[in-house]
Each structure stands twice: as structure tokens, then as C-alpha cells.
Image (cartoon, helix red, strand yellow):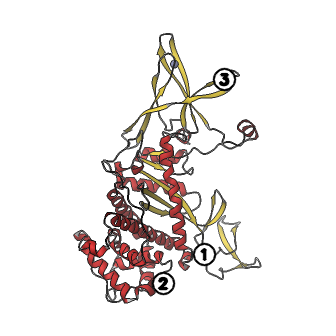
Amino acid sequence: MSRPRAVPAPRRLSTAEQIEAVFSAPALYELAQLIPRPPVGRPPANPAYVVLAYGVLARLYRSGIRVQTELSHPATWGLVHDTVARIKRQLPDELVPRLPGDRPATFEAFRNARDRYLTDPDIRAKLQARFIDAAVRQARSFGLLRPDGPGSLCHPDRSRTIYGDGTVVRPMYRPPAARRETDPETGETRVVYLDPAGEPIEAPGRRFDPDVAEYHGHAGPVFGQNFVALYARGDGPQQRVVLAIDRVPRPGLEADTAVELIKQVHAAAESGIQAVAYDGAFVGPQVDEVMTHTGLIVVNKVPAAPRSAADKARAGEGKVPRWYPLGVWEHDTPGGSCGHTVAAINGAVSEVGLDESGAPVVLGRLNRLQVKRSRRSTGRYHFNVAYRVPCPAGEFTAWITPHAEPGDPDHRRAGHVRVIAEGEPDFARLYGLRNDAESWNSMLKRSLLVDRAASLGGARQLVDVLCFALLHNAMTAYQAALAADPRPALKRAA
Ligand SMILES: [Zn+2]
């Protein structure tokens, strides 16, 4: 069994090293194979991977135009050439690229390829899927997501836990003033743009992103585009691998977008993953869907209960615990049958009882002994968890399922029961991974904010995010290679 190795603190990479990192990443060549060649006309001056790398470098330089200026310097274009010539010898036969052309890639060539191919829905879906395959391979090369790795379903390992988050990227330009009108005859709604005086106009007079929408987060409404990403990471610095990204099609669908991505990553990594950490956007239906479709344990918090005045009086300013009754488990004792009432309290399976005044009271959390996962004829997974129930007449084992049962179409049980619940060491260890997603979100935003392309609509912004994910993983791979051998890349190759 291998674990991610501890590495020395990574140093900052020079721009030349970052360019080397981009052109050294096998994922660049793998994804570029999905970009078709123009059917007619002159052959393009540069291979498809150069066009894709252009988009990746646009995230490095934070501007698409800037890349053209940088690449037009003979030393920089020479570095691209040398890096490709070196990596050619290390790539599998089917990926071996032809060398870049004599003339550097241009913004126009990138823009044409982006608008014609990279934003094509079919091609983009294939790029996203192949990105996942390449990312899972990279993660495994770091000792992550390994089917032979450490951990169990009862106590998953961090190296086999994926985590995710959504983030709203604000547009550079505010959306134009508009209102929705409903046609009284057809009942259809349409958007009417308004001039500064509030009068209806044909079209907005300035640049804007037609795909931004209002998302409601913890900090109130935000206008922008919502992107979801999944990750895995080692325990050292700069060992994060972006596994998958997608754009949320419209407000209210972040959690479902994330569930679909988890299914795709699971299809690529299979038993290499044991658990997934996500935020409170996953409630009953998503928790049950992930667990039954992929067989992964979902690690997240049960959302706080809505607070009434009576709750506040009882619990003060603290979180109001969520109670969900699970039933009575009986066992035989010398004195006859003995019953224990079990409920999920903030997700944790617990024994409950009544105090002297008859009010419900938590007697204690039950210890998780074993997690059993079976697969049904439908292909769906089913979990059953064994808990030790203490009793003066002799402890016994209760098997409890976290799944919705017949008569629970809203998945309320799955919404309230967590195999790994807040307040236990496993939860802190695994859920803690999620904090790391914040730093990727802020790096992504820094790479996008000053880019004019940020107002070009959802499909092109998704290309930007995919390119940033490629850049990020290329840097992670480069840092790992440096950690293994700190000599310059050209010396390492020789
Ligand atoms: Zn008992």
C-alpha cells in the first residue's frame, strides 16, 4: 500500500517553468486529440495541442491577448519547441505529438478553435470526460484514489476521499437592467432590456454575459456563473488534483450537477474512492443518490433545523439539534425482552430516552462497528451499518440502514442519517479536506477577473475553467517531479 509521500515545501515556479509544466502534461495531448482538424482550407499552422495550450496559458497570463505577445518572443517559442521535443520521448505512442509550427500560435487561431470546437457541446462533454480520466491517472501516480490503498468503508482514508464545492464567478460587467414580462395570451415569459431611464430597448447597449444568473449563497444573492469542481489531494502542500469540473446550468441545480460529476469520477476511479465530502447543498435526495448509485459514503453536515422562538429559548444561540426517530431495537435478556430507542441526532445514530420530566434526551452516540455494502439486482448499492448498543443486561449489535424506506419518497431518512456524522474523529479528518476547495476557487477567480473573455457567456467560460484546471494539474505534476528530482527539467530528461 502506498501513501502520498511527504515532500519539501514547494518553491514558486518561474514563468519558463510554468510553460514547461503546461507542455509536459500528458493530459494536454490526450485532450487535444478530441479537437477535430478543420475539414477544408489550409492546414493549421500549429497542432491542436498548441491551441489548447494557448487557452491554458491564457489563465497563466490572465489574458488571451497577452499569450500571443509572450509566445511571439523567439526564446519563449523555442522553449515550447524544446519542451515538446523532450516530452515526445516519454509519451505513449498514440499520444506522440508533432512539433509546434515555425510560427507561434496566435490569439485568432485560439479564438477560432474555441468558438468552433471547444465550446461545441459534444466536444466539450468529451473534453470534460477525458479530463477526468487523465486526472484520475495523475492522482493515482501520487498514491491517491488507489483501489489497493488504505482505509475501509467504516473508516475511509483521506487519500481515497474526494471532495467538492461550487463557486460563483462574478461577471466583469454588471448585467444590464431588465425585467421579465409574461405575455398575457401565450403565458410565455421573455426578458425585456431597459435603458438607464427604465424604458424598454431592443438590446442592451454594452457588453454583458447573457448566461449570468442570480445564485443564493450564504452571503446573499450573487450574480454570475456557478461552477462545480471535485478534487483529491495528498497531505503535503500543492498536492491537489482537480478531478472534474462543470458549469451549473441554472440556479438551484448545483447539488445535482455535483452528483452527476461524482458519478463520472466514480466511473473512472471505481473502488479507488471510498467517500465524498461535500457541503450542506447535499440533502436527502443527493445523499441517497450518491450512496446508492456509486456506493460511496457521503460526508457532510446535516443542515441546521429552522429556528423557532421556542428553539431559541431552549438551545440559546447554539445549533438546534435535528432529531430523526429510527425505531426501537430489542434484544433478549435473562429478564425478558429489552428495548432501546434509536434516533439520528445531527446525523449521528444515537440512543435516546426520556428524562424524569418525560422530555426526550440523548443517552449517547452509538459506536459504529462495521459498514456493509451490498449490491442489488438493480445495480444499486445498499448500506447497512452495525452499531454497538450498550445495556446493563449485555451489549448487543443493531443493524441500521441510512437509506430511504418505502413510504419515504423525499429521502428524509437519508437526509438525517450520516454513516460518518459530525462530531466524530473520522468526520473531522475527512470533512476537513473541503476547506481546501476555497483556495482553488480564489485562484480560479484571480485568473479570470481581469480577462475580457469573462463576459463571453457560459460555454466559453467553461472552457476557461477547464483550461485553468489543466494548468493547475500541470503545476501539481511539475511540483511532484521537482520534489522527486530538483534538477532542471532538461537535465532530468537527459
Ligand atoms: Zn437492553
Q: Which disc is residue 443 wearing?
A: none
The front one of 248 and 231 is: 231
The front one of 241 and 408 is: 241
Q: Is the shortest distance between ligand 1 and the CB of mark 1 under 8 Å?
A: no
Q: Residue at position x 42%, y 72% from top?
A: 13
Q: Is the shortest distance between ligand 1 and the CB of mark 3 under 8 Å?
A: no
Q: Which disc is residue 172 wearing?
A: 1
Choose the circle earlier in sequence order: 3 or 1.
Answer: 1
Locate residue 250 relative to residue 114 in the image: left or right.
Answer: right
Q: Classify mark 2: residues with Cα within 10 Å, few (<14), some (14-19) or many (20+).
A: some
Q: Residue at position x 39%, y 70% from top?
A: 123
The amino acid sitting under disc 1 is Met
Using the image, determine if residue 127 lies above or below residue 375: below
Q: Position of residue 374 (x, y in %)?
A: 37, 38
Residue 489 seen in the current view: yes
Q: Position of residue 388 (x, y in %)?
A: 46, 27
Residue identifier under label 2: 66
Choose the circle earlier in sequence order: 2 or 3.
Answer: 2
Secondary structure of residue under mark 1? loop
Using the image, determine if residue 270 lies above or below residue 24: above
Using the image, determine if residue 131 lies above or below residue 453: above
Q: Residue at position x 36%, y 68% from top?
A: 478
Secondary structure of residue under mark 2? helix
Choose the circle earlier in sequence order: 2 or 1.
Answer: 2
Residue identifier under label 3: 355
Disc nearest the viewer among 3 and 1: 3
